[in-house]
Amino acid sequence: YVMMWRNGRPDHYYAPYPGQVSEPDFVKFYQSPTNIFQDRLTPLAIYGKYILPEKTK
């Protein structure tokens, strides 16, 4: 597996930032059905019960 992390700043990043030369390839990687990111993983509740976030006003 590959684990991504947050980008600290434009010169210290783990995933391409907007406008970076490899951004289009990363978007393809993100959209691939064989890869799963947190937004698709959380609802699966594989680590325990999934609690819906409260709606913001």
Image (tube, rainbow, N blue to C red):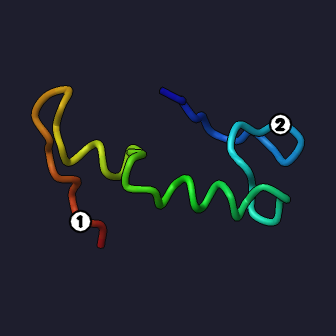
Front of the two marks 1 and 2: 2
Residue 18 locus on image (x, y percent): 75, 63
**Which residue is located at x 83 percent, y 36 percent?**
12
Residue neighbourhood size for the residue with mark 2, other residues' Cα within 10 Å, grouped as few (<14), some (14–19), many (≥20): few
Query: Residue at horizontal 14%, vertical 28%?
Result: 48
1 or 2: tag closer to the N-terminus:
2
Seen as rendered, the residue at the extreme left is 49
Q: Is residue 8 above or below residue 43?
A: above
Quarter of the image containing the C terminus? bottom left
Foreground residue among 12 and 25: 25
What residue lies at 75% left-to-right and 55% top-to-bottom? 17
Q: Position of residue 19 (x, y in %)?
A: 81, 65
Drawn side of residue 24 relative to residue 38, left or right: right
Query: In the rendered image, which residue does mark 2 sit on?
Result: 12
Q: CA distance from mark 1 to mark 2?
A: 33 Å
Q: Residue furthest right?
A: 11
Tag 1 secondary structure: loop
From the viewer's perspective, tell me whether residue 32 is left or right of residue 26.
left
Give, as a three-letter code, the residue at label 2.
His
Secondary-structure class at tag 2: loop
Label total for image? 2
Nearer to the camera, 46 or 34: 34
**Given the current orientation, which residue lies at the most extreme bottom position?**
57
Residue at image point 85% right, 59% down: 21
- Please state which of residues 25 and 48 is positioned toward the viewer in this rendering: 25
Instruction: Tell me if residue 33 comes above or below residue 44 in the rendering.
Output: below
Left or right of 28 in this view: 18: right
Q: Position of residue 44 (x, y in %)?
A: 18, 43
Q: Is residue 51 left or right of residue 38?
A: left
Mark 1 — residue? 55
- Contact (Cβ within 8 Å) of mark 1 with mark 2: no
Q: Which residue type does callout 1 highlight?
A: Lys
